Amino acid sequence: MIGRREAARVLWRGAGDAVRARPRAVARAAGWSAVEAVPTAVFGRAVGEAVDAFRTGRTSGAAAWLGVLAVSALVGAAGSRRLYPALAAIVEPFRDELVRRVATGALHRSLRGRPDTGAVARLTHQVEIVRDTLGGLLVVARGFAFAAGAALLGLASMAPEVAALVLPPLVLGLALFGAVFGRAAARQRELVVGEEEIAERTAALAAGLRDAVGCGGEELLREELGAAVEAQAAAGRAVARLAAVRAVALAVGGWLPLLLVLAAAPWLMRRGATAGTVIGALTYVLHGLQPALRTLVHGMGGSGLRLAVTLGRILETGAPDAPAPPEPAAPVPGAPAVELRGVTFAYGAGARPVIENLDLVVPHGDHLAVVGPSGIGKSTLAALIAGLAAPGAGEVLVDGRPAGDPGRRVLVPQEAYVFGGTLLDNLVYYAPDAGPEEAGRAVDALGLAPLVRDLGGYGAQLEPGALTEAQRQCVALCRAYLAPQRLVILDEAAYRLDPAAEARVEEAFARRPGTLVVIAHRISSAMRARRVLVLDGTRAHLGRHADLPAVCPLYRDLTGRWEDGSQPPGVLGDPDGLDPVLRADLAVDAGEVVADGADRQDEVLGDLRRGRAP
């Protein structure tokens, strides 16, 4: 952050956008702020009139003006009471937007291989700082605007000459404060960044102190750390100097008007002003303008600086604005449902490829199961087909178009997601036009009627944390079944279900129009598929369940263990204890992937080609 313009840009982009996005809440806050400012508008006039009435012996008139002042105080209290809910309607949604921005930014960087270790601090600490300081800043800013406006309005109605005397120094004080605010924000940011740098340098020095002494590097380290400490001290001194300038701005805008009114009192008296008029004018300055300006300067100098610095940090680390999504391209006529051409993928530039030079064709209506040992690349293959990972070499096509368009496929991962809302809302999320009748047909096809009954029906409100993992998986599976996308990828999506329930779910998806790819948790998933893809780390085999044992020793071993009842748990990959999320820092992929297709098509060996030079 550099200077006044950058500080103003941050506040305009962040806090300003939060205010402009909620015009109704702003209108309510402005209305109740005007009501709250009624005592300030009446105060000086009532005091001045009461003084004149007492001075001339009109006691009843003085009591009436004091009564007006008391009633205005009650009106102001009522406005203040109704003001804060309106302010909360601005601040709380902005907090939610910041949480989404921080989470999106962290995911954006993590997906590009740069894990964001500071996201938790921004979520738990910096977002709350922005929330609190924005609330305080709104209270301060609107308080100054309405209090100063009410005081100037009262002055103008009682003594226009005094208003002309008071307004110029007030504007000058505000201009002086605005001129130093940007510099103060920049120095405050330097102070925050300097603290972080010193902490990092100190931790590194403590960890490597023995090596530094052994290499004779004490003097160099002393100079580097000393320079950082001196820079931090300089930033602290700069902040202190700018605080002194704020005090000057307060003196110019708050105390100079008072001196001007006192100095002009004889002139005003000669022009016909009464003692009450002068006292009322001083009351407006002392109890209206000066407190409002003091609150603004101290509030903006404290909370405003914290808001500019912290909000600037959150905006810096947020994800870039996403471009407008392009219009979806039509499928390429005659293209298969899925095609991989010479695909290679590795977790890092120096890592051994998990998938290497893989060619695969999955025709429309196919039912493909992917099997292999844990970590062999099955979930990676599912992520590539879904477009969640980009190949290092080759290309992945869905309907002849680059993978990644969510309108062409639906993926059900190992860890299913359920959001707060009704059961029906969760089921029809991908098909919003579907109703209870369509959902009921999907539930019947998947054998999930007991689940719907146990959860309380389609209108039942779901608490995601109260559901078991199996229940969440069933909800996600039914959601995918109702989706309009023709390609379904089940990444061990039924591993929490018993074998009978898993079989029922996979058979229902196989009968569903479209193409099915299943990452197998049990070898029985491969036995139900039309075709099976076996990944064994050295080569890939594609074929029917009945044909593969003759050409693939690994598959023969897996099916033999299953058929004699000796298959150990997790032979295809035990999801328990594995991270189901594709991450760049994993040495191998974290799960299994199975694909299912149509059962009535003839198997043709040779759709898969691996090991050729690209």
Image (tube, rainbow, N blue to C red):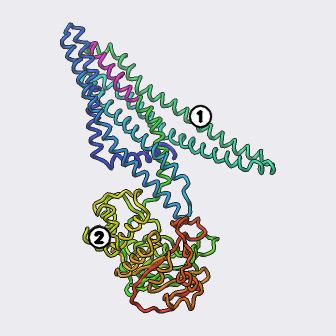
- Mark positioned earlier in the residue sequence (2 or 1): 1
Say whether residue 278 is magenta.
yes
Contact between labelled residues 1 and 2, with CB atoms less than 8 Å apart = no
Residue 185 in picture, x, y percent from top left: 50, 41
What's the residue at 45%, 39% (across, down)? 304
Q: Secondary structure at mark 1?
A: helix
Say whether residue 17 is magenta.
no
Q: Is residue 345 visible?
A: no
From the image, state whether disc 2 or disc 1 is nearer to you.
Answer: 2
Front residue (pair 450, 403): 450
Residue 91 in picture, x, y percent from top left: 37, 44
487 lies left or right of 575: left
Q: Secondary structure at mark 2?
A: helix
The boundaries of the magenta stretch are 274-293
Residue 603 in picture, x, y percent from top left: 45, 91
In the picture of the structure, the residue carrying the numbered disc 1 is 237
In the picture of the structure, the residue carrying the numbered disc 2 is 439
Which amino acid, mark 2? Ala
Q: Is residue 122 visible?
A: yes
Residue 243 in picture, x, y percent from top left: 51, 32
Label 1 crowding class (10 Å Cα cut-off): few <14, some 14-19, many 20+? few
Farthest-out residue, front: 565
Front residue (pair 276, 147): 147
Number of the label disc, if any, that sits on residue 504: none
Vertical comparison of 387 with 548: above or below:
above
Which amino acid, mark 1? Arg
